[in-house]
Amino acid sequence: MSALYLLIIASLVVALGFLGAFIWSVRKGHYDDDYTPSVRILLDDAETSPKV
């Protein structure tokens, strides 16, 4: 039974580690989209194209 408690504690530590790494990466801007704004001008939007 003590092995079960040890595994539960270990899994919680690993889960909190992954949560901390995710929060750190979001705050550092690793999920910011730098590519789409630079190519947005190249994409043709149907709403902004001139009517013929």
Image (cartoon, helix red, strand yellow):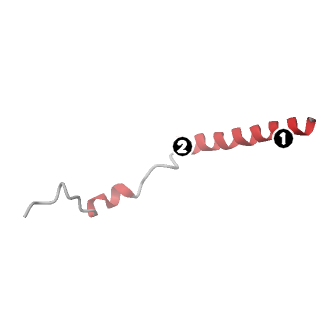
Residue found at x 71% / y 41%: 15
Q: CA distance from mark 1 to mark 2?
A: 29 Å
The label number, if any, that marks residue 50 in the structure image: none
Which numbered disc, 1 or 2, marks the residue that appears first in the sequence? 1
Determine which residue is flagged by label 2: 26
Where, by quadrant of the figure, is residue 12 drawn? top right
Is 38 situated above or below 31?
below
Where, by quadrant of the figure, is residue 38 drawn? bottom left
Picture quarter with the C terminus:
bottom left
Q: Point out the frontmost of discs 1 and 2.
A: 1
The label number, if any, that marks residue 7 in the structure image: 1
Rendering coords of residue 7 (x, y %): 84, 41
* Label 2 crowd bin: few (<14), some (14–19), many (20+), radius 10 Å: few
Q: Secondary structure at mark 1?
A: helix
Picture quarter with the N terminus:
top right
Q: Relative to 49, is 14 on the left or the right? A: right
* Label 1 crowd bin: few (<14), some (14–19), many (20+), radius 10 Å: few
Q: Secondary structure at mark 2?
A: helix
Residue type, mark 2 in image: Val
- Front residue of 30/6: it is 6
Residue at the extreme right of the image, as rendered:
2
Rendering coords of residue 14 (x, y %): 74, 43
Is 37 situated above or below 29?
below
Residues tagged 1 and 2 counted as in contact (Cβ below 8 A)? no
Is 16 situated above or below 40?
above
Residue type, mark 1 in image: Leu
Residue found at x 70% / y 38%: 16
